[in-house]
Image: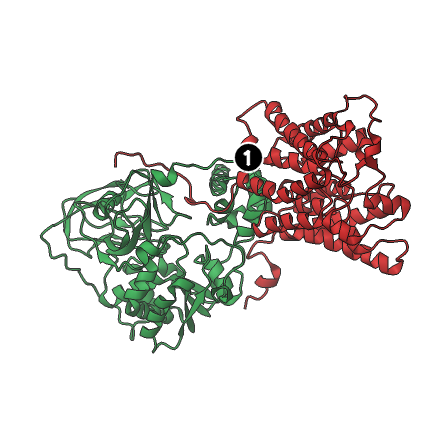
Amino acid sequence: MSSTLTIAPAPHVRGGDTVAQIMWHVVIALLPACGFAIYLFGLAGLVTITAAAASCLVAERLLRRTGASTLADGSALVTGVIYGLTLPPGLPVWMIAAGGVIAIAIGKLLFGGLGYNAFNPALVGRVFLQAAFPTAMTTWLSPLGPDRFTQLPASTLAVPLARSDVGIDAFVGATPLGRLKFDAMDTPLSDLALGLTTGSTGETSAVLLLAGGLYLVARRIANWRIPVAICGTAALVTGLLHVADPAAYPDPRFMLLSGGLMLGAWFMATDPVASPVTRSGAWVYGIVIGLLIVVIRLWSGQPEGVMYAILLGNAVSPHIDRWLQPVPLGRRVRDVGRVP
Amino acid sequence: MSRLLPTFRHGIVPPPNKEATRGAAIRQFPFAPELIVPLLQHAGNAAVPVVREGDTVVRGQLLGSADGDFSVPVHAPASGRVRRIERVAIASGQMVPGIRLEPFPASTQEVLEATPCPLESATPDEIIAAVQQAGIVGLGGAAFPTHRKLRVPANRSVELLIINGAECEPYLTTDYRVMLEQPGDIVLGVRFLLRATGAVRAVLAVEDPCRDAADAVMAEGAGVTALSAQVLRTKYPQGAEKLLIKVLMGRDVPHGGLPIDVGALCVNVATAAEIGRLLPHGRGIQERVVTIAGPGVREPGNYRIPIGTPLRFALFHVGIRGNLSRVFIGGPMMGQTVANLDVPITKGASGFVAFTEEQTALEPAVYPCIHCGRCVEACPLFLNPCQLGILARQGEIARMRDAHNLADCFECGACAYVCPSNIPLVQEFRAAKAALLRQERAT
């Protein structure tokens, strides 16, 4: 009884995950895709993911000038891993590092750090690279190369800002989306689902990404309405177009399984910070992103549109939140109208 | 099976922690050497003392009479001597007028009876007056004078009298034990209430684990055809009256309105039991059933404790385990911590819980809000705690009130419970409400 009683506000009990636990669950959910990336691209995959994560962690540690280290909340690691998975395998390490610093510095810390970023930081890093190094960002390593576990592509360790035309023979032409857009060539759906194709480091295996996404949904970390709305909208719109003109428009299954759609829908659009908080808001946000993906993929000059679609979705998210506020109990005309 | 039972939307399911006291039958508490009886134990005006220092009083005798209609009288919890009439500290930290009473150890402590209120012949107005005279207030925690609720406005009628047995706060089991052990009092209380309000139907609402208690009451009330029971799915904060009305009647209490506006009237089951126990004898409240629980308590249980018993005495009586670090009156979701143990148990205290350093050592780190929306999914009133919290931290309290219905929040704590960033949302909302009140007073 000698102890002191403290005054504290209720509630005196807490439930559910903390922010740090949520972030670690996201990392766990990404592990299958990371493992598959290393299987598919060997050392190049490993180096890409590691360099991306390391650059984000270092940037978060060094660029936060005030307060305690925020590495323990796990958010910089999540950004780093997701960022790494969106990059072409074998991208020069110095470019990866530059993009990682941009992701954390401009995408996150300039807005105020965790919880304040308007856009998904990983995509901010990637969109910078896309604009600054378009050639490197669209040069794709062929999957399952025979020397992938023993040799790094020469470009990986390229000197910053030097001409990077070395080792180009290790690369093949285009991703499935690029082949469709520029060469009107199909890729077998089974290869797409399993991920045995060219593409960004961690975007290829739709099945493993879906498994990770479902893990997050089961743990109530990702709002399932967002990926369902994105996939549903993309499939529905593409499906209608495909039925109308099968020659001009791809199969909706191709639309879902190719490119960064699965990675984006389950892991990036669901970033809570830059997505709406209400159920109805999540639906609208997902539908907006799904529509934008279809529009950019089918009618723009680029084969892939997931990144831009999500960033634009992030931009409208605060407005969706403003429009779709929950209606409090006792203020609903319908139910109050039932008063005798 | 239990998932199919009716409940409200949103809300949370915290661990109930009721195992330690559920099976503990109500035990009578001894008298402390000094009882601190506040004259303000209810919402409204403090009672006016009708005794003087040095007076000898009998248990059940009037100590303070009601000051107007928005007030209830206070009765002596023990036979003894009035030591002091002065301002006393209560659990909230406020100082209110009160009476320090020294019980006579050798007294038989027989309870004084006044004019009984017979169920069969009393008019509704007589019952309502008797309810006030007995000092009855909502025993669920709000301590709102019950007689004020029972007076139905001329243009309204009570379609459904809700007897609230949905004891949704973790740890607390007083309502459960009262239902099991005093079913006769409850049924009689319900009959008084039906007569006083002119209600056609009464329903006893309990959560799934208290099914057996509802059965006990229904067995006793087999002759009262107007009374039925409804078992609800366990969820917090089901016992909030707006939510019970929503679940049982499908109606929203309109903003700024009262339950009676939708034909509902909610009375806590322990309050009903007290009406049935006291009115036939013309007695007033001198004691109440309290759950004492928590990891810091050696003998958790349900006790019938004289009003005015200091927490310190009560805790020593049941035994302390470990180093107490936090004691709160009520449950862990809405309970108010006390700064010291020399405050009394009052009519509104349905329980108190003691935590030790073990439970409070790890104060969780607070992170920035990540907009996860868990609070939005938890809020039973469909407010937006996420947005309210952001505005609170920006000092935008007027917008919290005008655009986000801050006033509707009844501080159930569901948002703060689920917040992964451990943001003290309820605290922020209370501070904003207090600041708005100060602004209004200043203008």
Q: Disc 1 designates what residue?
A: A73
Q: Is residue B427 above or below residue B75?
A: above
- At horizontal 15% and vertical 55% (from top left) the residue drawn is B58
In the rendered image, residue B98, in percent from the top left (x then y), is placed at: 25, 45
Q: Which chain is red?
A: A
Please tell me how crowded label 1 is: few (under 14), some (14-19), or many (20+) other residues with Cα within 10 Å.
some
Q: Is residue A327 above or below residue A23?
A: below
Helix, strand or loop at mark 1? helix
In the rendered image, residue A206, in percent from the top left (x then y), is placed at: 71, 49
- At horizontal 61% and vertical 45% (from top left) the residue drawn is A29
Is residue A234 in view from this perspective? no
Q: How many marks?
A: 1
The three-letter amino acid code for the residue at tag 1 is Asp
In this rendered view, identify the residue nearer to me: B156 or A198.
A198
In the rendered image, residue A268, in percent from the top left (x then y), is placed at: 68, 42
- At horizontal 34% and vertical 49% (from top left) the residue drawn is B45
- At horizontal 49% and vertical 44% (from top left) the residue drawn is B416
In-image side of A331 versus B162 (left or right): right
Is residue B52 in view from this perspective? yes
User: Image quadrant for the N terminus of chain A?
Assistant: top left
Q: Which chain is green?
A: B
In this rendered view, identify the residue nearer to me: B47 or B109.
B109
In this rendered view, identify the residue nearer to me: A340 or B141.
B141
- Give the quarter of the image for residue A70: top right
The chain letter under disc 1 is: A
In-image side of B432 versus B399 (left or right): left
In the rendered image, residue A50, in percent from the top left (x then y), is placed at: 65, 32
User: Image quadrant for the C terminus of chain A?
Assistant: bottom right
Q: By what rule are the colours in the image chosen?
A: by chain
